[in-house]
């Protein structure tokens, strides 16, 4: 039987009211829902890829990370690890699970370390962010904070504009933090820390922590994860007065690909 417009509106309102008043089960409550979104595009060489993966494995095992989790009100977080490259390439290496102590952290790290190392073409930071928002919206957890931790070494060059994805995430109460990798600066835009600051990160308390050498990978990743769990202060490596900074072109990756790569290597 067909419902009238008024009946459908009433049903929708009733559903919304029920959603608003329902208390989430205690087993789903966490201090933080964290999506670790890691660039595996082919601009990363094999050594950097391995250092990045090993850095996250070591950081998740580390007592500083575990202690940060245990200092929260709920003493637990929900965590997932995703690798990304092009707009349609997001691979979940470790699905959502609760980390609430050293045993759970070690199990997560063990599972991550056992995953294969693979790369793919394209750099769609926007695709990673939009995937992260979807993962946060559809999981079973209820976090005080929701964060996407994005690492990468090049600008967005596929998919939606990165600022569109960033603004969408922020509108859904998601914070985006950044780990720009500057070990081998991108020839397209070498100042990836500035690109991440102006085009990628967003939300209340968002920060970035650049990696400038291979030796910094492990420490930088651990420091970043600890700050994310603890809700630490904003960080920028070398603050530059706004008046002295040239504007950042958040479409530099797309413009460069269309001009140089697409005519010769379509779909790269």
Image: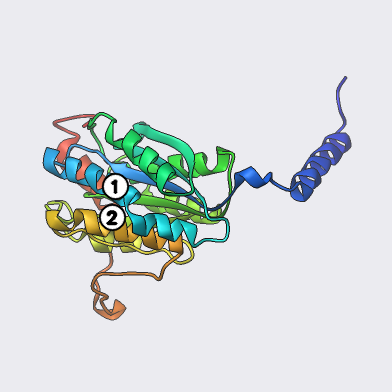
Q: Position of residue 104 (x, y in %)?
A: 43, 42
Q: Is residue 181 visible?
A: no
Depth order, front residue of 224/76: 76
Rendered image: mark on residue 92: none
Left-right relation of 234 to 121: right
Image quadrant where one finds the N terminus: top right
Q: Dot 2: within a 10 Å radius of its alpha carbon, few (fewer than 14), some, or many (20 or more) residues?
A: many
Query: Which residue in the protein does label 1 denote?
Result: 56
Which element is circle 2 on?
A: helix
Identify the residue at the far front of this view: 103
- To which quarter of the image does residue 63 belong? bottom left
Depth order, front residue of 95/20: 95
The residue shown at (29%, 44%) is: 57
Which element is circle 1 on?
A: helix
* Real-space CA distance between mark 2 and mark 1, rounded to the nearest whole angstrom: 6 Å
Q: Dot 1: within a 10 Å radius of its alpha carbon, few (fewer than 14), some, or many (20 or more) residues?
A: many
Image quadrant where one finds the C terminus: top left
Vertical comparison of 171 with 40: above or below: below
Identify the residue at the far top of this view: 1
Query: Which residue in the protein does label 2 denote?
Result: 221
The residue shown at (58%, 44%) is: 141
**Residue contact between numbered discs 2 and 1, judged by CB atoms under 8 Å:** yes
Q: Position of residue 125 (x, y in %)?
A: 34, 45
- To which quarter of the image does residue 86 belong? top left
The residue shown at (25%, 70%) is: 237
Q: Position of residue 209 (x, y in %)?
A: 28, 62
């Amino acid at each position: 039987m067909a419902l009238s417009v008024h009946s459908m509106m009433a049903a929708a309102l009733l559903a919304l009211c029920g959603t608003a008043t329902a208390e989430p089960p205690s087993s789903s409550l966490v201090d933080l829902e964290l999506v670790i979104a890691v660039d595996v595009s082919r601009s990363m060489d094999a050594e950097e890829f391995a250092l990045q993966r090993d850095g996250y494995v070591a950081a998740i095992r580390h007592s500083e990370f575990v202690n940060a989790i245990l200092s929260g009100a709920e003493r637990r977080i929900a965590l997932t690890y995703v690798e990304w490259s092009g707009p349609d390439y997001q691979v979940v290496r470790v699905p959502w699970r609760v980390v609430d102590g050293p045993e759970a952290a070690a199990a997560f790290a063990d599972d991550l370390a056992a995953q294969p190392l693979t790369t793919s073409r394209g750099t769609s930071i926007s695709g990673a962010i939009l995937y992260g928002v979807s993962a946060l919206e559809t999981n079973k957890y209820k976090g005080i904070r929701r964060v996407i931790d994005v690492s990468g070494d090049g600008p967005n060059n596929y998919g939606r504009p990165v600022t569109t994805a960033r603004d969408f995430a922020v509108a859904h109460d998601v914070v985006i933090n950044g780990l720009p990798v500057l070990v081998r600066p991108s020839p397209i835009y070498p100042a990836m820390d500035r690109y991440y600051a102006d085009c990628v990160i967003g939300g209340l308390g968002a920060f970035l922590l650049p990696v400038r050498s291979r030796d910094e990978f492990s420490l930088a990743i651990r420091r970043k994860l600890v700050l994310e769990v603890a809700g630490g202060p904003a960080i920028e490596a070398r603050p530059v007065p706004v008046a002295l900074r040239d504007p950042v072109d958040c479409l530099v990756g797309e413009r460069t690909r269309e001009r140089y790569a697409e005519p010769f290597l379509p779909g790269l």
